[in-house]
Image (cartoon, rainbow, N blue to C red):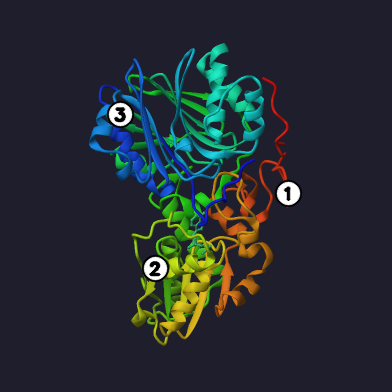
Amino acid sequence: MTAGYGSDTPTEKCGVVGVSLSGRDAARPLYYSLYALQHRGQESAGIVTHDGFQQHTHVAMGLVGDAFSESDLATLNGSAGIGHVRYPTAGSVDRSCAQPFSVSFKSGSLGLSHNGNLVNGEELRSELENQGHAFTSDGDTEVIAHDLARNLLESDLVRAVKRTMDRIHGSYALTIMHDDTVLGVRDPEGNRPLCIGEVPDGYVLASESAAIDTLDGELVRDVRPGELVVLHDDGSGFDSYQLVERERTAHCFFEYVYFARPDSRIDGTLVYEARRELGRRLWAESGVQTDVVMPVPDSGRSFASGYAEAAGESRAAGGEGSESVEFAEGLMKNRYVGRTFIMPTQHERERAVRLKLNPIASTVEDKTVTIVDDSIVRGTTSTQLVSLLREAGAEEVHMRIGAPPIVAPCYMGIDMATRDELIAAELSPAEIGEEIEADSLAYLSIDAIAETLDLDRGELCLGCVTGEYPYSIEGEESDREVDRPLIGTSALADD
Ligand code: AMP
């Protein structure tokens, strides 16, 4: 399989949307909703619409605002469409893998947007190639599209999707367009998010509810793991088909910790509230009294506010109410340093942190400081920050992390880093604390995450923090026994 850590900076991947309206072109709502999901992918953006007769496509490299001009949007006719923002975790970094993927075949046209990563994509690709399918890209999405197109020659839409779902293994949130019908599919373990929204003249599917808010819509509910949702062509509603049932889910906890927008609601949980609660638990587990609590912007902000609030409460309870903990935005972020900032060497990565974050000396001078971030991947950011804060005059620098140590790569659609690059793959938290030269370093426990999300550990995908994946990954050295049935990459369901 193709894992996604070819890039030099850890990044997240894709966002998907789908819209079906009663009488208005879908292009602009799709464009706005992609804007809302820009944080999920900055490499390319695309929209495919259908006007009842034919498909219209515009896919381009770059940010949403750069990828579409007014005239591009004007050519995207039709009241139904899907869209995509991409950062690659599988396939190459070029136009051939940009999505939505679209294709015309004997029974009509197909468009497909995919967030996730198949663990058996390569196997399915060679099987389809042996049957005469010709591929134009090396990504998973085209594999799903070909498989679905083939099934549509023999079955109706719902059955064809079911057949494809029985064959593809891994994580996927898909928005699909078959002619002018828009569909949404979520993988049977609910690893990647997908939700349904209602706007006055139609329905919307999106990776995150923030996209629905952007359209002034209402979140209806999340697509259920293993469910197919078919939006009515006239924007009047949607049909639901529970196509695959699994005993357990494998929700990605990292969506809550880092990827999703804080203003999104995933599977009933507002990400902002979850992060604040994780911050509070971080205090409960490993709080250290300091003069100032400071977030690493933007990812550490909600954690730090929960942490500082709990720190303040504990001081008050201890009769030290007057000495409230200062919550300071002491690290300024250059918002123009994007997540796709190209950093070919470790030296440049270090420069990039300096370019991105600058401390305000007066907030830290002669003070004991706690900095709070969501995660440590390679350790570049934390090492740089600790030394920057010391240079700015901090007396002590403590670091608190709102996730457990990341010890293993992600194969489920999140571009993290290779195992060799992960600082926690080899070092214990205490050793990492020494390495980054912090006065103390503490991570959050897995139990705190499960309790905050109100899920059992077994309902979460914890692959990157345990090395135990919901799917068996070929060549993954640290595959261990897990308390769920493993689905082997070779166990392809018969068609
Ligand atoms: P590092 O500097 O490699 O330790 O990365 C940690 C920083 O990257 C933290 O500030 C995180 O918020 C952020 N981060 C964590 N995971 C990712 C990811 N998959 N993509 C982009 N940034 C990430």
Q: Mark 2 sits on what residue? A: 355
Q: Position of residue 298 (x, y in %)?
A: 40, 61
SS at mark 2 in the image: helix
SS at mark 3 in the image: loop
Instruction: Judge the density around disc 3: few (<14), some (14-19), many (≥20) Cα neighbours within 10 Å.
Output: many
* Residue 277 vs residue 471, the one in the foreground: 471
Q: Quadrant of residue 412?
A: top right
Tell me the residue at 34%/15% (across/down).
53
Q: Mark 3 sits on what residue? A: 26
Q: Position of residue 281 (x, y in %)?
A: 53, 64
Tell me the residue at 61%/61% (across/down).
422
Between discs 1 and 2, the one toward the N terminus:
2
Q: Label 2 to label 3, Cα distance in Å? A: 39 Å
Q: Is residue 171 above or below residue 177?
A: below
The answer to whether one can see residue 260 in this image is yes
**Label 1 vs label 2, nearer the camera:** 2
